[in-house]
Amino acid sequence: MPSDNTRPPYAGESRKLIISIDVGTTFTAASFCLLQPGNVPKFEEILRWPKQATPDAKVPSVLYYDRQGKARAFGAETEDEDTVIEAEENEWRKVEWWKLHLRPSHLPIIRDLQLPPLPAGVTLQKIFTDFLRYIKDQIKAYITQTYGSGGNLWDVLSPTMYVILTTPNGWEGSQQSRMREAAIAAGLVSHDGGRRVRFVTEAEAAVLYAADSGNVEDWLVEGSHLILCDCGGGTVDITGYKINAVKPALKLEESAASRCYLAGAVFVTQAAQAFFRARLSGTEWADEERLQRVVYHFDRNAKKKFSETDAACYVQLDGHKTIPEKNITRGRLKITREEMESFFKAPLDDIKRGLDIAFENGGKLADKVILVGGLASSPYVFSKLVAWGDEYGISVTRPDGPTVKAVANGALAWHLDASVGSRIAKYHYGIAVRTAFDNTKADHRARASQKYVDLDGEEVVDGVWACIVDKNAKIEATKEFRKPFTTTYKADATDFAYSLRIYAYRRLTAPAFVKFPGKNTFQPGFDSICNVEADLSKIFQATRVQVGKTGQKIKRVSFEVCLTLGDTEISARMRWLENNQHVYGAATVAYD
């Protein structure tokens, strides 16, 4: 992986603009790269945000909405004292941790995390759209004000720019689809430019940033293995990688399936908040408004600075009152080391458990762990994970520099360098098919009431699991996985719209059927991922007429559904034979 100053010059013929946006649970960062023919690409962070006291690459992922559902403040504005007063006077509603509302159903909130509710009448989609529009406006303002001809630059290049959005490892096509819709609604791309919105996992972007930074150069040895652990605000992403090549360009492949845990920094805050609510009960700081200010001070100070050598930490309260029985002295609340450690325990347990799994599933080949993300910058968390590594003989390190920009800059590197050549399938992927009813099989007999006679005159039953890609299979970036199908039409059919549902099975060994007998509910482990939709009229026209067993004229339309899973999104197309030649037709991947 070349760093900025050694990456080869851009070989394109015209200027292009790429922007990356890392919307985190607690903080957001954005970067951009202006590609100019013959010049070495340079990554630049957005370092000026409205109402920011000092330049910083990150802003809070927080908004204020008024009572009519209009967004009134964003990012650093929500921490500005004047804005906070205005919000209180006008009863604006604060929105934070909203990204976790998008989580997939198979990643349930654990440990009873109480997500702040969304304001009445304000949807998650609107929040995402409003926030992305705000980010777009700040990127535009930064480019316009930084470059001499920035206004013209933006006007010319923004209509065709690529937008790279980051996601946790656990986010899937449905979440990507909603984020793409929000990006279009926010004006980042036009409605017909949706394919210029691309997605990269936060872990993959982070490992590329770590390599790009030069601080882990000694670890980049061909044939070696490492684990990337991105400890963010809401999620912890863990992925194992094998280094296939270092020069002239870094080439990686996943060696262990990526995993996602809801174990980020907000869980530390949640535990601390519950502690403050109990400790301050019956005091002047017990009301919700003042309690939230206590949590804010904890987040910005004690939580960031706490190390395992500290005997205690202190959180500033309003006023100068002393209440000895509550460990409050002159308006400062004392938190013992044991109490502080209890806040971090659950997330740390999950992180170490996830690292154990990545280490085992990667064949115990990795001997290095790279930590990035806000929670990893905690001295306490870092020291505990270093101790975990010492126990197993694994080196643990953090790249120097602001870890918040790791993902935003790594996303640009991902787009430019295509360093990751293959990934590991996290789950089994497949479809439900029809098969001949077999009365000798118990699971068929259990579905006897669901059997029917098809156009061929055969007794059949639907819903049989057919795997296309096995869990833990190695997926090359451009490899297509194909599954043959035959569907029967009447010879005079006129409707050729075809839809095929793609499922994931998240456990080890799948049962024979996707759903329970006689019910429309999934057996445990199955989830619906998306639909692949296509027009089969050309295949129908190329298929000869036959006479079925019932004497009816029919056409048995045979084709293959081709899935590509090696990129960060699922893509699909159809394939069939015409005159002994394979012909391809378009298919659309659609999400609920």
Image (cartoon, grey):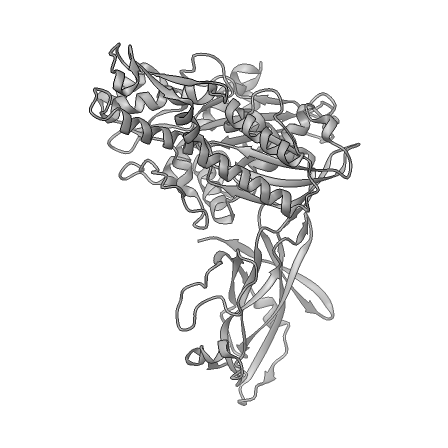
Where is residue 207? Give x, y as percent: 63, 33
* Image quadrant assignment for residue 562: bottom right
Where is residue 420? Give x, y as percent: 68, 40
Left or right: 302 in relation to 91: right
Residue drawn at the location 45% of the way across and 64% of the way down: 523
One can see residue 256 in this view: yes
Left or right: 140 in relation to 370: left
Q: How many marks?
A: 0
Where is residue 96? Give x, y as percent: 37, 31
Q: Is residue 193 above or below residue 277?
A: below
Residue positioned most to the right: 248
Residue drawn at the location 29% of the way across and 10% of the way down: 330
Along the line of sight, the residue nearer the viewer: 447 or 485: 447
Residue drawn at the location 66% of the way across and 24% of the way down: 213
* Image quadrant assignment for residue 16: top right
One can see residue 199 in this view: no
Along the line of sight, the residue nearer the viewer: 400 or 172: 400
Residue drawn at the location 44% of the way across and 44% of the way down: 103
Quadrant position of the N terminus in the picture:
top right
Where is residue 393? Give x, y as percent: 67, 34
Q: Is residue 444 above or below residue 467?
A: below
